[in-house]
Image (cartoon, helix red, strand yellow):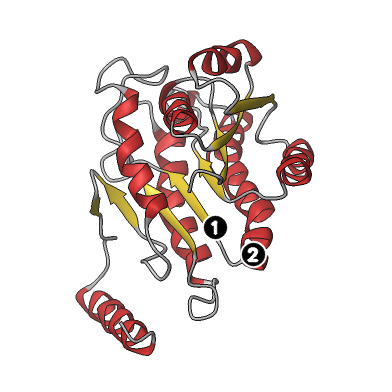
């Protein structure tokens, strides 16, 4: 895994910075993207020398992100892992949020995440290897006051992850996996309470290290799968489908 190339969005602070530093120190090639160049420079100053580079860009700008992904692939001949971490958390009441502000939050937290998947997934399928980790949240289950836009966007990340996974041919492309990571409460620019951001590194690393044929389209918190709020019939069908897949693969 030491030669894999990782793209981390929101790499200038919080969990994104912690993940970037962790992977760089483990000698992955890490490319960070964020809006604030000074914050990204701060990440580079801490990371293992020569293992982290960055682009200052708005991840919601599809054209800019497309150019960045193409440059990474041209430079490194690969882009193996995407960690979709960037997000914003405007603390506003729903009725105080303008339509433009609402759209901006959805665009950054959801649409940009989908577009990053759209940009890297074709190359992963072609090379028959890839890992996508969408950093989500359980904020949608019990939204707190002044979090309507954030909670709505993060609730959609569960669906986005499962939907993309369902479209990957797991029989022929078993080593291309997309999953959602749900961090515990973390102290960051979004929140002044919670644990240290670097606690996210080990569970994310474990998701990336999973072998070919591992589950895809799942959500994980503290190393455990968080099942969607589905009816019993659908859950049983899901379990049966997994069993058939495993038998087909000879496992």
Q: Which residue is mark 1?
A: 130
Q: Which residue is mark 2?
A: 127
The image quadrant that residue 100 belongs to is top right
Labelled pair 2, 1 in contact (Cβ < 8 Å): yes
Q: Position of residue 4 (x, y in %)?
A: 55, 46
Q: State whether residue 116 appears in this view.
A: yes
Vertical arrangement, residue 185 with respect to residue 152, above or below? above
Residue drawn at x 59%, y 18% is: 40
Circle 1 sits in a helix, a strand or a loop, which is it? strand
Q: Position of residue 238 (x, y in %)?
A: 30, 77
Viewer-closest of 61 and 152: 61
Q: State whether residue 138 appears in this view.
A: no
Q: Position of residue 22 (x, y in %)?
A: 42, 30
Viewer-closest of 250 and 161: 250
Viewer-closest of 79 and 194: 79
Specify whether 43 is left or right of 118: left
Task: Tell me the CA gap for discs 2 and 1.
Answer: 8 Å
Residue drawn at x 41%, y 28% is: 15
Q: Residues within 10 Å of mark 1 (few under 14, many from 20)?
A: many
């Amino acid at each position: 895994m030491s030669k894999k190339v990782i793209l981390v969005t929101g790499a200038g602070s919080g969990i994104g910075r912690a993940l970037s530093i962790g992977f760089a120190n483990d000698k992955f090639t890490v490319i960070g993207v964020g809006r604030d160049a000074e914050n990204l420079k701060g990440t580079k100053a801490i990371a293992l020398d020569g293992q982290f580079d960055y682009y200052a860009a708005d991840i919601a700008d599809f054209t800019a992100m497309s150019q960045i992904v193409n440059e990474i692939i041209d430079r490194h001949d690969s882009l193996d892992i995407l960690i979709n971490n960037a997000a914003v958390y405007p603390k506003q009441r729903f009725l105080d949020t303008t339509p433009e502000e609402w759209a901006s939050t959805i665009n950054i937290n959801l649409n940009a995440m989908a577009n990053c998947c759209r940009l890297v997934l074709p190359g992963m399928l072609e090379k028959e290897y890839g890992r996508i980790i969408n950093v989500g949240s359980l904020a949608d289950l019990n939204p707190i006051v002044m979090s309507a836009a954030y909670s709505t966007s993060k609730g959609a990340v569960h669906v986005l992850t499962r939907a993309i996974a369902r479209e990957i041919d797991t029989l022929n492309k078993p080593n291309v996996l997309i999953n959602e990571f749900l961090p515990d409460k973390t102290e960051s620019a979004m929140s002044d309470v919670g644990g240290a951001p670097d606690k996210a590194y080990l569970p994310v690393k474990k998701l990336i290290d999973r072998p070919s044929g591992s589950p895809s389209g799942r959500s994980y918190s503290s190393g455990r799968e968080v099942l969607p709020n589905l009816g019993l019939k659908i859950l049983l069908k899901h379990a049966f489908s997994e069993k058939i897949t495993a038998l087909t693969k000879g496992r």
